[in-house]
Image (cartoon, helix red, strand yellow):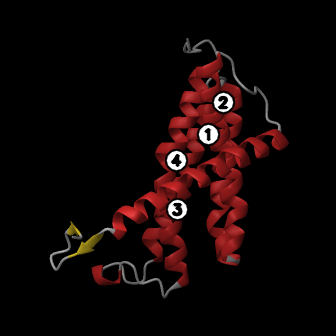
Protein backbone atom coordinates (compact mmCIF):
# COMPACT_ATOMS: atom_id res chain seq x y z
CA UNK A 1 0.00 0.00 0.00
CA UNK A 2 1.24 3.48 -0.86
CA UNK A 3 1.14 5.98 1.94
CA UNK A 4 1.57 9.72 1.89
CA UNK A 5 5.00 10.88 3.01
CA UNK A 6 4.19 14.07 4.85
CA UNK A 7 7.27 14.26 7.08
CA UNK A 8 9.56 15.86 4.50
CA UNK A 9 10.61 19.31 3.32
CA UNK A 10 8.37 20.52 0.48
CA UNK A 11 10.46 23.59 -0.38
CA UNK A 12 11.88 22.27 -3.67
CA UNK A 13 8.57 21.02 -5.11
CA UNK A 14 6.97 24.35 -4.18
CA UNK A 15 9.85 26.20 -5.91
CA UNK A 16 9.48 23.92 -8.94
CA UNK A 17 5.76 24.71 -9.06
CA UNK A 18 6.43 28.44 -8.78
CA UNK A 19 9.06 28.18 -11.55
CA UNK A 20 6.65 26.22 -13.77
CA UNK A 21 3.83 28.72 -13.26
CA UNK A 22 6.28 31.59 -13.89
CA UNK A 23 7.33 30.06 -17.21
CA UNK A 24 3.65 29.49 -18.05
CA UNK A 25 2.79 33.16 -17.47
CA UNK A 26 5.84 34.35 -19.41
CA UNK A 27 4.82 32.22 -22.40
CA UNK A 28 1.20 33.42 -22.27
CA UNK A 29 2.29 37.04 -21.99
CA UNK A 30 4.60 36.70 -24.98
CA UNK A 31 1.78 35.06 -26.91
CA UNK A 32 -0.57 37.96 -26.12
CA UNK A 33 2.03 40.51 -27.21
CA UNK A 34 3.23 38.67 -30.32
CA UNK A 35 0.01 38.51 -32.34
CA UNK A 36 0.00 41.43 -34.80
CA UNK A 37 -3.68 40.74 -35.54
CA UNK A 38 -4.95 40.19 -32.00
CA UNK A 39 -8.23 42.00 -32.71
CA UNK A 40 -8.96 40.02 -35.88
CA UNK A 41 -10.44 36.59 -34.96
CA UNK A 42 -10.12 35.38 -38.56
CA UNK A 43 -6.32 35.72 -38.26
CA UNK A 44 -6.12 33.48 -35.15
CA UNK A 45 -4.27 30.70 -36.97
CA UNK A 46 -2.42 32.83 -39.52
CA UNK A 47 1.13 31.71 -38.84
CA UNK A 48 2.75 33.72 -41.62
CA UNK A 49 4.35 35.82 -38.84
CA UNK A 50 7.03 33.53 -37.39
CA UNK A 51 7.12 35.27 -34.00
CA UNK A 52 3.37 34.73 -33.64
CA UNK A 53 3.65 31.07 -34.71
CA UNK A 54 6.37 30.36 -32.16
CA UNK A 55 4.69 32.32 -29.35
CA UNK A 56 1.31 30.68 -29.96
CA UNK A 57 2.61 27.11 -30.17
CA UNK A 58 4.82 27.69 -27.13
CA UNK A 59 1.90 28.91 -25.01
CA UNK A 60 -0.42 26.16 -26.21
CA UNK A 61 2.22 23.47 -25.74
CA UNK A 62 2.82 24.67 -22.18
CA UNK A 63 -0.93 24.56 -21.51
CA UNK A 64 -1.09 21.00 -22.83
CA UNK A 65 1.63 19.94 -20.39
CA UNK A 66 0.32 21.66 -17.23
CA UNK A 67 -1.89 18.85 -15.96
CA UNK A 68 0.55 16.08 -16.85
CA UNK A 69 3.54 17.80 -15.27
CA UNK A 70 1.93 19.21 -12.12
CA UNK A 71 0.13 15.94 -11.38
CA UNK A 72 3.36 13.97 -11.80
CA UNK A 73 5.32 16.45 -9.71
CA UNK A 74 2.94 16.43 -6.75
CA UNK A 75 2.08 12.72 -6.75
CA UNK A 76 5.80 11.96 -6.91
CA UNK A 77 6.40 14.48 -4.12
CA UNK A 78 3.75 13.05 -1.82
CA UNK A 79 4.34 9.35 -2.45
CA UNK A 80 8.02 9.04 -3.40
CA UNK A 81 10.37 11.86 -2.39
CA UNK A 82 9.93 15.62 -2.15
CA UNK A 83 13.58 16.57 -2.67
CA UNK A 84 14.00 14.39 -5.76
CA UNK A 85 10.65 15.63 -7.13
CA UNK A 86 11.68 19.23 -6.62
CA UNK A 87 15.00 18.73 -8.37
CA UNK A 88 13.32 17.01 -11.31
CA UNK A 89 10.63 19.71 -11.40
CA UNK A 90 13.15 22.54 -11.51
CA UNK A 91 14.99 20.83 -14.37
CA UNK A 92 11.69 20.33 -16.20
CA UNK A 93 10.78 24.03 -15.85
CA UNK A 94 14.26 25.04 -17.08
CA UNK A 95 13.97 22.80 -20.16
CA UNK A 96 10.50 24.19 -20.94
CA UNK A 97 11.87 27.74 -20.72
CA UNK A 98 14.36 26.91 -23.50
CA UNK A 99 11.64 25.71 -25.89
CA UNK A 100 10.76 28.94 -27.77
CA UNK A 101 14.36 30.09 -28.05
CA UNK A 102 15.55 26.78 -29.48
CA UNK A 103 12.55 26.62 -31.81
CA UNK A 104 13.28 30.16 -33.02
CA UNK A 105 16.86 29.23 -33.94
CA UNK A 106 15.86 26.05 -35.79
CA UNK A 107 12.63 24.08 -35.59
CA UNK A 108 14.24 20.75 -34.73
CA UNK A 109 16.38 22.30 -31.96
CA UNK A 110 13.23 22.51 -29.84
CA UNK A 111 13.71 18.77 -29.26
CA UNK A 112 16.68 19.69 -27.03
CA UNK A 113 14.04 21.16 -24.73
CA UNK A 114 11.18 18.74 -25.34
CA UNK A 115 12.93 15.38 -25.03
CA UNK A 116 14.71 16.08 -21.71
CA UNK A 117 11.43 17.44 -20.33
CA UNK A 118 9.56 14.28 -21.41
CA UNK A 119 12.36 12.16 -19.98
CA UNK A 120 11.88 13.82 -16.58
CA UNK A 121 8.09 13.52 -16.56
CA UNK A 122 8.07 9.94 -17.85
CA UNK A 123 10.52 8.97 -15.11
CA UNK A 124 8.34 10.50 -12.39
CA UNK A 125 5.38 8.47 -13.71
CA UNK A 126 7.50 5.31 -14.02
CA UNK A 127 8.74 5.74 -10.44
CA UNK A 128 5.18 6.28 -9.18
CA UNK A 129 3.88 3.24 -11.03
CA UNK A 130 6.73 1.08 -9.79
CA UNK A 131 6.14 2.19 -6.21
CA UNK A 132 2.41 1.48 -6.50
CA UNK A 133 3.16 -1.97 -7.90
CA UNK A 134 6.25 -3.04 -5.93
CA UNK A 135 5.90 -0.95 -2.78
CA UNK A 136 9.21 0.87 -3.26
CA UNK A 137 10.61 3.48 -5.60
CA UNK A 138 12.56 2.35 -8.63
CA UNK A 139 15.08 5.18 -8.16
CA UNK A 140 15.79 7.76 -5.49
CA UNK A 141 18.44 9.91 -7.16
CA UNK A 142 19.03 11.47 -10.54
CA UNK A 143 21.02 9.15 -12.81
CA UNK A 144 20.75 10.53 -16.33
CA UNK A 145 21.72 7.35 -18.19
CA UNK A 146 19.14 5.25 -16.34
CA UNK A 147 16.52 7.96 -16.81
CA UNK A 148 17.20 8.13 -20.55
CA UNK A 149 17.01 4.34 -20.93
CA UNK A 150 13.71 4.15 -18.98
CA UNK A 151 12.33 7.03 -21.04
CA UNK A 152 13.31 5.41 -24.33
CA UNK A 153 11.76 2.07 -23.31
CA UNK A 154 8.45 3.64 -22.32
CA UNK A 155 8.49 6.05 -25.27
CA UNK A 156 9.00 3.19 -27.73
CA UNK A 157 6.24 1.17 -26.07
CA UNK A 158 3.95 4.21 -26.30
CA UNK A 159 4.75 4.59 -30.01
CA UNK A 160 4.04 0.91 -30.69
CA UNK A 161 0.67 1.11 -28.90
CA UNK A 162 -0.15 4.39 -30.68
CA UNK A 163 0.69 2.88 -34.08
CA UNK A 164 -1.57 -0.07 -33.31
CA UNK A 165 -4.37 2.27 -32.24
CA UNK A 166 -3.89 4.28 -35.45
CA UNK A 167 -4.32 1.13 -37.55
CA UNK A 168 -7.53 0.25 -35.69
CA UNK A 169 -8.88 3.82 -35.94
CA UNK A 170 -7.95 4.03 -39.63
CA UNK A 171 -9.88 0.82 -40.24
CA UNK A 172 -12.93 2.17 -38.40
CA UNK A 173 -12.77 5.60 -40.06
CA UNK A 174 -12.16 3.96 -43.44
CA UNK A 175 -15.58 2.33 -43.11
CA UNK A 176 -17.34 5.66 -42.68
CA UNK A 177 -18.20 8.46 -45.03
CA UNK A 178 -18.84 12.14 -44.45
CA UNK A 179 -22.19 13.61 -45.37
CA UNK A 180 -22.95 17.27 -46.02
CA UNK A 181 -23.72 18.30 -42.44
CA UNK A 182 -20.39 16.91 -41.22
CA UNK A 183 -21.73 13.83 -39.43
CA UNK A 184 -20.14 10.46 -40.09
CA UNK A 185 -22.25 7.50 -41.13
CA UNK A 186 -21.36 3.89 -41.80
CA UNK A 187 -20.87 2.86 -45.39
CA UNK A 188 -23.17 0.19 -46.74
- Outermost front residue: 188
Distance from disc 3 to disc 4, alpha carbons, whole Å, reads 10 Å
Residue 16's disc is 1
Tell me if 91 is positioned left or right of 53 in this view. Answer: right
Foreground residue among 18 and 71? 71
* Residue 110 percent coordinates (x, y): 67, 67
Q: Which residue is mark 4?
A: 21
Label 3: which residue?
27
- Label 3 vs 2, first from the N-terminus: 3
- In front: 137, or 90? 137
Q: Residue furthest bottom?
A: 48
**Residue under the point 69% across and 56% down:** 115
Q: Quadrant of residue 126?
A: top right
Name the quarter where the C terminus is drawn.
Answer: bottom left
Please rate how many residues cluster around mark 2, counting C-alpha atoms within 10 Å: few if below 14, some from 14 to 19, many from 20: many
Residue at position x 64%, y 47% in the image: 157
- What is the number of the mark on residue 127? 2
Mark 4 vs 1, N-terminal side: 1
Say the numbered circle drawn on residue 98: none
In 3D space, how far apart are the residues under numbered discs 3 and 2 (Cα atoms)? 29 Å
Dot 3: few (<14), some (14–19), or many (≥20) neighbours within 10 Å?
many
Does label 3 or label 4 sit earlier along the sequence? 4
Amino acid sequence: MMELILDQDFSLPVLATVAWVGVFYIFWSVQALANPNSFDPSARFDYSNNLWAIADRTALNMSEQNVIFLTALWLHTLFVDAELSGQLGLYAAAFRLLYPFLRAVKFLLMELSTLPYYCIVYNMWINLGFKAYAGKALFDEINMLSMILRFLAVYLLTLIVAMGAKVVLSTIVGKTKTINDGHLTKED
